Image (tube, rainbow, N blue to C red):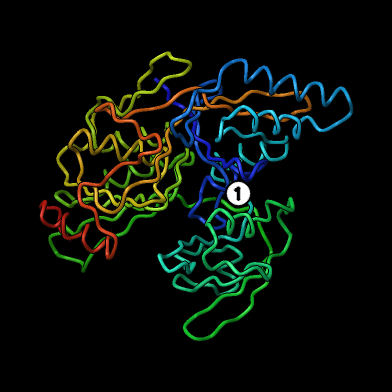
């Protein structure tokens, strides 16, 4: 059965918020969360609150229609109605923003092609640079510190704010517009002017861990930055191609979610069918199941942190509850509500919360997140590799 779509948004950053927070740790790499086929529920952030009712949807739709009839912005009127509804993670998008979201689901986005994380001391470090992208052409490398964006200091800023600056979300910046970055490498700080471009995400990367061994049993690291279209299949293919006996370290740190259907496909790489999650839409209970035939013998360790959200939490919860993986890191974010989109007058789209999902053991992720089996805050990957080696998965 198809599962719910995921989109992330923040009440404090309307119109494009979801596009900003979706890949909260991917600073300029993408702008969407995930989803399921049109008409199904979409999973996004949750907390303990009442589920949006049909009256809420009617109120939002009526507000947009009245505004359009009066020659005003239906999007702004709908935003006000959503704000009053109490649905913290409801969101409204104008036609352009929603089109951007749809493209992002296919792995396309406007940005500069770099991914980064904010460390505990507040510094923003570039973790990966997309080959051929504007950042790569400017000579920016993994390990560089991102200090400013268009003159705004980014130290200690929320990652979502940095994403908005890099993408130019608040100014409606498109491909071809420029953004000025202050980048530090060692003790040298320089300024680079980059031109935003239309890029394709590289959501999944795979590499061997440790030195090459003649027995080909070195563990495989699979990093999943987001669950855009095709990412689940990429994970499954990586597991199929991994050497016999090699363990898998599945890194979901900073993964802000994406298409739930892709997360279920990824779960199918490690499970031989069975339950992945349950969810409700307007009180109607539904379930998500893995496909049969996954690798159930290979040792697996999943790395998570506070940036692991929604669809990534769904995958983590499934592998943890089913006893298929050991989870290492810190408590995940806690996103897990179901939203459904509806088209409004004037072409804008509103999404309101209609339900929540739970892990196979019935645990709600809502506002709680997932507690890893081994909680570590420092040198998490090193600890995870040690655990994987202890499971017989190589290192």
- In the rendered image, the residue lying farthest to the bottom is 187
Q: Is residue 43 above or below residue 371?
A: above
- Would residue 171 be found to the left or right of residue 394 on screen? right
Q: Residue 169, how many percent across, how many down?
A: 68, 51
Residue closer to the observer: 97 or 48:
48
The residue at which mark 1 appears reads as 109
Q: Residue 226, how many percent across, how many down?
A: 45, 46
Residue closer to the observer: 340 or 283:
283
- Would residue 26 be found to the left or right of residue 216 on screen? right
Residue closer to the observer: 341 or 155:
155
Total labels: the figure holds: 1
Q: Residue at coordinates 85% horizontally, 31% vertically from top-left?
A: 72
Q: Residue 184, how many percent across, how many down?
A: 53, 78
- Would residue 376 be found to the left or right of residue 59 on screen? left
Q: Residue at coordinates 22% horizontally, 49% vertically from top-left?
A: 301
Of the 4 image quadrants, the one containing the C terminus is bottom left
Q: Quadrant of residue 104?
A: top right
Q: Residue 352, how many percent across, how many down?
A: 57, 27
Q: Is residue 316 above or below residue 63?
A: below
Q: Is residue 28 above or below residue 259?
A: below
- Would residue 358 be found to the left or right of residue 34 on screen? left
Q: Is residue 380 above or below residue 79?
A: below
- In the rendered image, the residue lying farthest to the top is 284
- Neighbor class of circle 1 (other Cα within 10 Å; few <14, some 14-19, many 20+) is many
Label 1 sits on a secondary structure element that is strand
Q: Residue at coordinates 48% horizontally, 62% vertically from top-left?
A: 116
Of the 4 image quadrants, the one containing the N terminus is top left
């Amino acid at each position: 059965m198809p599962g719910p779509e995921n989109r992330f948004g923040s009440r404090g950053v309307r119109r494009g918020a979801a596009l900003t927070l979706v890949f909260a740790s991917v600073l300029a790499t993408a702008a969407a969360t995930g989803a399921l086929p049109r008409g199904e529920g979409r999973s996004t952030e949750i907390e303990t609150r009442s589920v949006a009712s049909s009256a809420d949807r009617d109120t939002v739709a009526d507000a947009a229609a009245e505004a359009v009839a009066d020659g005003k912005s239906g999007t702004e009127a709908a935003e006000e109605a959503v704000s009053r509804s109490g649905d913290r993670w409801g969101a409204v998008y104008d036609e352009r923003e929603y089109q951007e979201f749809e493209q992002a689901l296919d792995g396309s986005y406007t940005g500069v092609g770099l991914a980064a994380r904010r460390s505990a001391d507040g510094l923003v470090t570039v973790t990966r640079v997309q080959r051929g992208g504007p950042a790569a052409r400017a000579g920016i490398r993994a390990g560089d510190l991102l200090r400013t964006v268009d003159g705004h200091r980014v130290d200690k800023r929320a990652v979502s704010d940095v994403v908005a600056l890099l993408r130019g979300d608040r100014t409606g910046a498109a491909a071809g517009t420029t953004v000025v970055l202050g980048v530090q490498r060692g003790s040298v700080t320089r300024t680079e002017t980059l031109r935003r471009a239309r890029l394709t995400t590289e959501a999944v990367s795979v590499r061997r861990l440790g030195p090459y061994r003649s027995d080909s049993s070195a563990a495989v690291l699979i990093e999943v930055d987001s669950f855009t279209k095709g990412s689940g299949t990429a994970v499954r293919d990586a597991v199929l191609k991994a050497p016999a006996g090699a363990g898998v370290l599945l890194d979901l740190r900073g993964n802000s979610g994406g298409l739930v259907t892709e997360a279920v496909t990824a779960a199918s790489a490690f499970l031989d069918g069975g339950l992945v999650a349950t969810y409700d839409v307007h009180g109607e209970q539904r379930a998500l199941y893995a496909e049969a035939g996954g690798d159930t013998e290979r040792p697996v360790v999943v790395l998570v942190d506070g940036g692991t959200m929604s669809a990534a939490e769904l995958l983590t919860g499934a592998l943890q509850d089913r006893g298929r993986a050991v989870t290492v890191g810190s408590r995940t974010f806690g996103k897990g509500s179901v939203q459904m989109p509806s088209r409004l007058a004037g072409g804008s789209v509103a999404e309101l919360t209609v339900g929540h999902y739970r892990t196979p053991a019935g645990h709600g992720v809502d506002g709680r997140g997932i507690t890893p089996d081994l909680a570590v805050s420092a040198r998490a990957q090193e600890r995870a590799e040690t655990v994987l080696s202890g499971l017989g998965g190589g290192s």
